[in-house]
Image (cartoon, grey):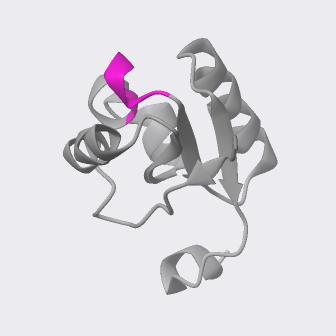
């Protein structure tokens, strides 16, 4: 049976090393990045923040923000970087995210 399985993203947990380890356990799961703030993705060190190795794919970028223009810009960046999915986080329980 073919099922799409996801590994839930977690802040400060699903970094590149964790995703590589998870990929070793299964080739059939969709992995997620840590949640990346829109401002970090736009103005930060993109290579450090958004890069990944091909072995991690399929891979979804999880992004959080409250500005629709910034969310659209990050979605375009993610598309250009060949992410398989863009997950816009709108229901995060984090106080930092909820303040907007």
At x 33% / y 55%, what residue is drawn? 14
At x 76% / y 35%, what residue is drawn? 72
Q: Nearer the viewer, residue 40 or 76?
A: 76
Left or right of 1? Residue 49 is left
Q: Quick check: can you spot residue 52?
A: no
Q: Quick check: can you spot residue 81?
A: yes
* Range shown magenta: 50-57
Residue 1 coordinates in the image, percent (x, y): 70, 44
Residue 42, placed above or below residue 65: above
Q: Is residue 88 magenta?
A: no
Q: Nearer the viewer, residue 65 or 62?
A: 62
Q: Quadrant of the C terminus?
A: bottom right
Q: Residue furthest right?
A: 68
Left or right of 46? Residue 71 is right
Residue 46 coordinates in the image, percent (x, y): 37, 27
Residue 60 coordinates in the image, percent (x, y): 57, 39
Residue 60, placed above or below residue 84: below
Residue 17 placement: quadrant:
top left
Residue 74 coordinates in the image, percent (x, y): 62, 33
How many badges with numbers are in the image? 0
Residue 35, placed above or below residue 26: below
Residue 13, placed above or below residue 82: below
Q: Is residue 52 magenta?
A: yes
Residue 85 placement: quadrant:
top right
């Amino acid at each position: 049976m073919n099922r799409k399985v996801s590994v839930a993203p977690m802040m400060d947990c699903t970094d590149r090393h964790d995703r590589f380890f998870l990929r070793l356990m299964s080739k059939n799961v969709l992995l997620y990045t840590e949640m990346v703030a829109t401002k970090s993705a736009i103005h930060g060190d993109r290579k450090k923040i958004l890069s990944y190795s091909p072995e991690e794919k399929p891979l979804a970028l999880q992004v959080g923000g409250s500005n629709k223009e910034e969310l659209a810009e990050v979605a375009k960046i993610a598309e250009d970087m060949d992410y398989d999915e863009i997950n816009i986080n709108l229901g995060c329980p984090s106080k930092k995210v909820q303040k907007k």
